[in-house]
Image (cartoon, coloured by chain):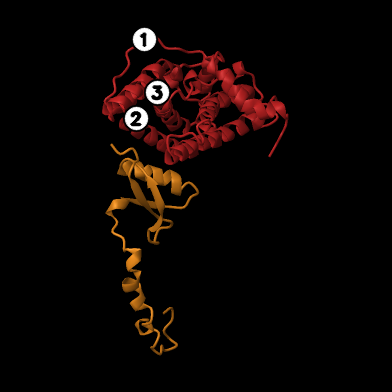
């Protein structure tokens, strides 16, 4: 039997209206314990109003050794940013 | 009820929290894992925060106390009126959870009444504490169920703890003369009325945890009169060391 509890990733929403952000990870035996541990470890200084936990094994991550083909092609394609339009002065907050 | 008696009543409530907080504090850095260590320390800090509010008020009410620190650190063993349950040692994790669960269930019922106290300060302290204690109860009940309904070994150890601690539960509902005065004055909680609700709650959770309700008619008491178990002296030696060695120290 494996002695270590599985790893969980913790996402905390710090204010209503904001999105949940990844805060870190922790060990717990089940989802309920993960939620309580997350509350005690990550929100004890009033950091949050909502918590999500997900077992780390359910997260599919990109492989760092494939960063070349995954991310580098996007580097020199500045035209994908919508910065080439002339905006009328009346349009604010763009 | 004069203000000295009122101070006694307030102190007798908070002594339970101070001593239980001290017990939990002993586990800081020694919890079974990092997450549980922080959780237990959080609970200890909640209890100390509540203790401070009560003791500050007690010191205001009674000139014999120079400050909240004098209430916390400068009394003799027989002047602490906490129940025997909270001074019991951290024998193993099952005892920590069992002790916490048996106290939390009482604590929540107490606060649910104390929030309607005619004493506005007590009512305010209770209203603030109630949310903290609701979480304590959730934490300890969840662990109780997890260990009770866990492996054969965890179930055996959890049952052992409940069996050993059970004899201290009835004292929670003992009414001292000060408790009665506080009830008569409309500021205190009638503990007898809490007893049936307490055992109802406890038996529900124990059943869910697949644990057996201990059957005994022998209950140990005395803490409320200042007669403590042999563990209390050691606990106080640790708790009071700094104030006794460096009187009036502050930081």
Quarter that holds the C terminus of chain A: bottom left
Question: In the figure, the red chain has which letter?
Answer: B
- The image position of residue B113, as x and y in percent, is 44, 30
- Asked if residue B70 is positioned above or below residue A65 in the image, the reply reads above
Q: Alpha carbon of mark 2 to alpha carbon of mark 3: how far? A: 22 Å
Q: Quadrant of residue A30?
A: top left
Kindly identify which numbered label has been placed on residue B194. 3
Q: Residues within 10 Å of mark 2 (few under 14, many from 20)?
A: many
| Earlier sequence position, callout 2 versus callout 1 | 2
| Residue that carries the numbered disc 1 in the rendered image | B217
Kindly identify which numbered label has been placed on residue B144. 2
For disc 2, the chain is B
On the same chain: label 2 and label 3?
Answer: yes
Q: Is residue B206 visible?
A: no
- Asked if residue B33 is positioned above or below residue A77 in the image, the reply reads above
For disc 1, the chain is B
On the same chain: label 3 and label 1?
Answer: yes
Q: Are marks 2 and 3 in contact (CB under 8 Å)?
A: no
For the point 52% across and 29% down, which residue is it?
Answer: B17
| Earlier sequence position, callout 2 versus callout 3 | 2
SS at mark 2? helix
Q: Quadrant of residue B208?
A: top left
For disc 3, the chain is B
- The image position of residue B2, as x and y in percent, is 62, 22
Q: Are marks 2 and 1 in contact (CB under 8 Å)?
A: no
């Amino acid at each position: 039997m494996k002695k270590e509890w599985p790893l969980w990733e913790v996402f905390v929403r710090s204010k209503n209206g904001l999105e949940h952000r990844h805060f870190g990870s922790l060990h717990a035996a089940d989802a309920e314990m993960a939620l309580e541990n997350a509350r005690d470890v990550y929100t004890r200084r009033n950091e949050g109003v909502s918590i999500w936990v997900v077992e780390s094994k359910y997260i599919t991550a990109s492989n760092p050794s494939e960063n070349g083909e995954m991310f580098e092609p996007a580097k020199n394609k500045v035209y994908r940013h919508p910065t080439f339009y002339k905006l009328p002065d009346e349009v604010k907050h763009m | 009820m004069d203000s000295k008696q009122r101070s006694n009543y307030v102190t007798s409530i908070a002594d339970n929290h101070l001593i239980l907080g001290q017990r939990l504090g002993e586990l800081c850095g020694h919890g079974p894992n990092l997450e549980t260590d922080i959780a237990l320390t959080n609970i200890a800090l909640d209890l100390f925060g509540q203790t401070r509010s009560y003791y500050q008020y007690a010191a205001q009410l009674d000139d014999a106390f120079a400050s909240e620190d004098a209430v916390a650190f400068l009394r003799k063993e027989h002047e602490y009126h906490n129940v025997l349950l909270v001074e019991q040692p951290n024998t193993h994790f099952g005892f920590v959870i069992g002790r916490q669960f048996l106290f939390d269930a009482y604590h929540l019922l107490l606060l649910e009444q104390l929030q309607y106290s005619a004493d506005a300060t007590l009512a305010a302290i209770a209203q603030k504490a109630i949310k903290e204690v609701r979480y304590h109860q959730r934490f300890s009940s969840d662990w109780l169920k997890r260990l009770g309904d866990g492996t054969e070994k965890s179930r055996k150890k959890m049952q052992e703890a409940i069996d050993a601690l059970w004899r201290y539960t009835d004292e929670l509902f003992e009414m001292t003369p000060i408790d009665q005065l506080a009830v008569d004055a409309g500021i205190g909680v009638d503990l007898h009325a809490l007893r049936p609700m307490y055992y109802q709650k406890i038996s529900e959770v124990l059943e869910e945890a697949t644990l057996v309700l201990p059957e005994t008619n022998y209950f140990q008491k005395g803490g409320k009169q200042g007669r403590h178990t042999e563990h209390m002296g050691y606990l106080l030696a640790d708790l009071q060391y700094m104030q006794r060695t460096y009187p009036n120290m502050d930081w």
